Amino acid sequence: MDCGNVIEAKSEAYFGQGSGQIWMDDVQCAGNESTLKNCSSNGWGVHNCSHQQDARVICQCEKNILTIKLVMGDNSCSGRVEVLYNGTWGTVCDDDWDLTDAAVVCREMGCGDVIEAKRGAYFGQGSGPIWMDNVKCNGTESTLLSCQSNGRGVHNCRQSNDAGVICSVSVRLVNGDNSCSGRVEVLYNGTWGTVCDDGWDLTDAAVVCREMGCGNVIEAKSVAYFGQGSGQIWMDDVNCAGNESSLRHCRTSGWGIHDCGHHKDAGVICNSVRLVNGDHSCSGRVEVLYNGTWGTVCDDGWGLSDAAVVCREMGCGSVIAAKSGAYFGQGSGQIWMDDVNCAGNESSLKTCRTPGWGRHNCGHYEDAGVICNCESKTFN
């Protein structure tokens, strides 16, 4: 979760009971795993627990790591911008605050496109330190921390100058195998709720995939494929034209108007890997989507086990060849993955071991590629 060191492992539903599936029990981690999914357990869904035993954690962000939150907005994707520095939350001054800066915040928060950059403490005045002033982002940064400013705590502002944002996305995917698959949930009036599968199809699902920055749609899932949600059902009879920037812009029966139960919750599976410049749809330069930006994979250590994961993820059957040296031409922009080390049984390239997103010592002349067996491609 990029949350630094652990402070406490909490038990007995310390932060409240969840609902639905209990996926893991008797978890045993060595401590060096890159994801909880790699730790041993009884097996997915095998347990003798109730939600009274839901596990929780309290982490400590490492010193000098800046985190961000939106406060006093109508939902989790709007509000006064606040950043965490040296363990203390503070605000951002609106000097030079514009759409480019706000867009970085929206992307960092997983909230899609920016709608407005707000000034003059639009969402109310904060308190405590003002950590950033004269922020100047070029728009490609993955975090507000990476943008230029006067320096932490260096400013000539008052809290009446606190900056804010309004972002477009209030959609999330729940219970999927990765961040680009799961049950579709939307935020309305500060409450998360589900979407009914009446009329749910690829056109509707494609809007969700695009809004989430998850590339193309693979499948539109129905009948609570990713488990039943709880609480509100916000949307029913969704009818998207396909060019909407947000699911909220699609036609529906109206917020909260439905004739469904949670056994009909809608879901999506999106594709965050693509093959470029190949001879067919199952060959090409490997590119992955991260934080809304496509980037390439370095060929250091690139082998058949790694390529096989890509082929399977793309629905392209077995691997024929793992290509290196920019065999399918050089990409541009980000190089997201290097020293990829897949066991071969992963469902997605993103779950394979690497030094971390964007950490590499490569150039695009080392872009990795694959050739898969196109005759075994499956269509959903």
Image (cartoon, grey):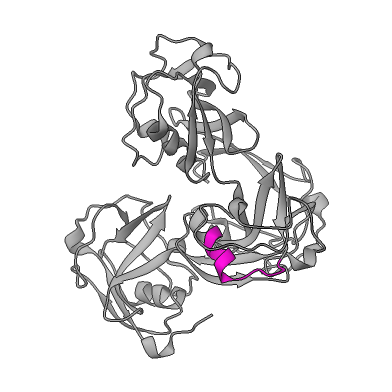
Magenta span contains residue 205: yes
At 35% from the left and 31% from the top, the residue drawn is 147
> Whole-percent x and y of residue 298?
27, 61
Residue 33, can we see it? no
The one nearer the camera, 103 or 324, is 103
In the rendered image, the residue lying farthest to the bottom is: 375
> Whole-percent x and y of residue 260?
81, 64
At 42% from the left and 37% from the top, the residue drawn is 104
Magenta span contains residue 222: no
The one nearer the camera, 68 or 342, is 68
Instruction: Relative to 131, say whether 179 is above or below.
Output: below
Residue 334, can we see it? yes
* Relative horizontal placement of residue 238, taking residue 159 as reference (left or right): right
Instruction: Relative to 45, say whether 120 is above or below.
Output: above
At 63% from the left and 63% from the top, the residue drawn is 239
Instruction: Relative to 351, say whether 231 is above or below.
Output: above
Instruction: Relative to 330, say whether 185 is above or below.
Output: above
> Whole-percent x and y of residue 378?
48, 84
Quarter of the image that includes the C terminus = bottom right
Q: Quadrant of residue 297?
A: bottom left
Q: How many marks?
A: 0
> Whole-percent x and y of residue 156?
40, 9
**Residues rendered magenta in the picture:** 197-208
